[in-house]
Image (tube, grey):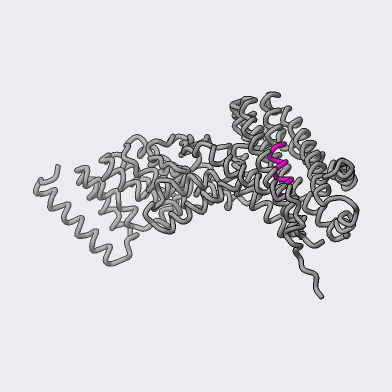
Amino acid sequence: MRRPSQRPLSCVPPRVAALLGAGLLLQVAWHGAQPPPLPRAEDLPPAPQAAVLQLTSLGDPLALSKVLMLWLQVFDNQPGISLPFRDLDYARVEAWLERILGLDPRGQYPLLAASRLYGAVPDPRRQRRMLDFVHEKFREDPARRWPWLAHAVYVAKYQLRDLPLALKYARALADNPGRGEIPHWAQQMQIFVLEEMGETEAARVLIGALLDSGRITDPHEFRFLTGRLRLLEEKSDDGSIN
Amino acid sequence: MRKGQAGNIPVIARFTVVEALRTRYGIILLLLTLLSFGLAQFLSQVAITETAQIQRAVVAAVLRFSAVFLVALYIITSISREFSDKVVELMFSLPMPRGSYYLGKLAGYAMLATATAVVFSLLLLTVTPWAQAAMWGVSLVFELLLVCAASLVLVLALNQVTPAFCAVVAFYLLARSITAMQLMAHGPLVDGHSMASQLIARLIDGMAFLLPDMSLFTRSDWLLYSTAQWQDLLPLLGQTAVYLALLSGVALFDLYRRNI
């Protein structure tokens, strides 16, 4: 006959049962006597050196980059408390984004976060900082990072209302070594910024040069730009612009 | 427990320590210490700024996790081996209460845990002011005592290495993060009207009642910003005593009921 795995409760000495009961009661009472945990906002720590992060990644920088990005993204949601982005130290945010991008240079997440998350705060100084970060990083890999600079043009033009800044970014999109990989609409953004600035002549010259260069092969695009050029010429003749 | 039977406890504790020394626990401890020292030196070469803070934070975290996993793994494999070799059955056949076996083992492992914490704290002294390193070390002793008792309870209950180790790791990680989980469960992002959220929050609150708040133990900010005072250790001592009593009650209750 198989022996039961448990002996009767009477085998447990009363002192042991008392110890178990007392231990349980004490633990519950101890926990109950502690003050309730209070949420405490913590500052974003300074980003460590890139070499330290490489070491910490244990040979898998991509995984560390993804984990750090998620950590940074939810840093504003600390246990029990929610911080507005504008309360974050943007110099540190930028340093973290740079390190994370350094761990995974092909990753897009840090640039997306810079342009669409941290760059969306209602604080022009912080927005400019993030846009400049995107611009700086775009120059390192234009073919891969152009969508974020294109967004930066939009933010500079419509949110910051800083047309010279929008033009600077739009020109960077058009004049860079990787422009073959960048769609024409993104490269043509400078035309519309120039138009907005009232620089009709410059916009006309730019469209004319673009049409003459033979780079526009799509008939719809060619027709659209030709129409735009004609409109600019008409407006220029009427003197409605400038 | 009669007086003569209580005399078995130091003997079992002594043999537990002797066994540890003969199974190269000391050598592993020494190797871990050397590796951590090497890591500290390497970090000092790599870091451009905040060298001391980086050394302290990284080395302390490595040492704490190493100590916890080393102690837990050693206890679990040692007791599991005793079950396989029928040593436990032999001990329980002797005219000695089962409680003496548990208390002797716990005392032996507590000595090993203390030795581990002392060695690691001595290493930290090379990169940290002595008072902060000493308080960190005392707190590590408390933390390791709880890990010892939890490992002993779980390996005595589960007998096998893998389930017991997984359970200890789960207990440790949960105990270190339970306060953060509580804050999140009651945080502003949680929908307070949702039944599921309320249920989860209650469940986490219930678990918090039964777990020690280990996030208060052995904190790195003591080493980085010298924030600890000696009196900060008193609540940790209280929590350790209370939880040791609870874990010992669970272990003894299980031991006396088991048919071994």
- Compared with A150, A91 (above or below) is above
Q: Quadrant of residue A133?
A: top left
Seen at 66% across and 34% down, the residue is: B237
Percent coordinates x, y for residue A217 in the rendering: 33, 64
Q: Which residues are magenta?
A: B141-151
Please indicate, yes or no, whether residue B51 appears anywhere in the rendered image. no
Q: Is residue A237 left or right of residue A154?
A: left
**Residue A213, horizontal then vertical, whole percent:** 32, 57
Image quadrant in which the C terminus of chain B is located: bottom right
Q: Residue at x 53, y 47 (%)?
A: A68
Q: Position of residue A230 (x, y in %)?
A: 17, 56
Question: A107 or B99: which is nearer to us?
Answer: B99
Q: Is residue B37 left or right of residue B51?
A: right
- Circle count: 0
In the displayed structure image, the side of residue B17 where residue B49 appears, left or right:
left
Residue B149 belongs to the span the image colors magenta: yes
Residue B203 among those drawn in magenta:
no
Nearer to me, A39 or A108: A39
Residue A109 visible, this angle: yes
Up-down relation of residue B64 to residue B254 (above or below) = above
Q: Position of residue B247 (x, y in %)?
A: 69, 47
Q: Residue sitting at 46 percent across and 51 percent down? A: A109
Residue appearing at x 76%, y 66% in the figure: A5
Quadrant holding the N terminus of chain B: top right
User: Which residue appears farthest toward the bottom when viewing the image?
Assistant: A1
Q: Nearer the viewer, residue A225 or A40?
A: A40
- Name the one closer to the observer, B31 or B162: B162
Q: On the image, which quarter does residue B94 sit in?
A: bottom right
Indicate left or right for B237 with A170 as reference.
right
Secondary structure predominantly adopted by residues drawn in magenta:
helix
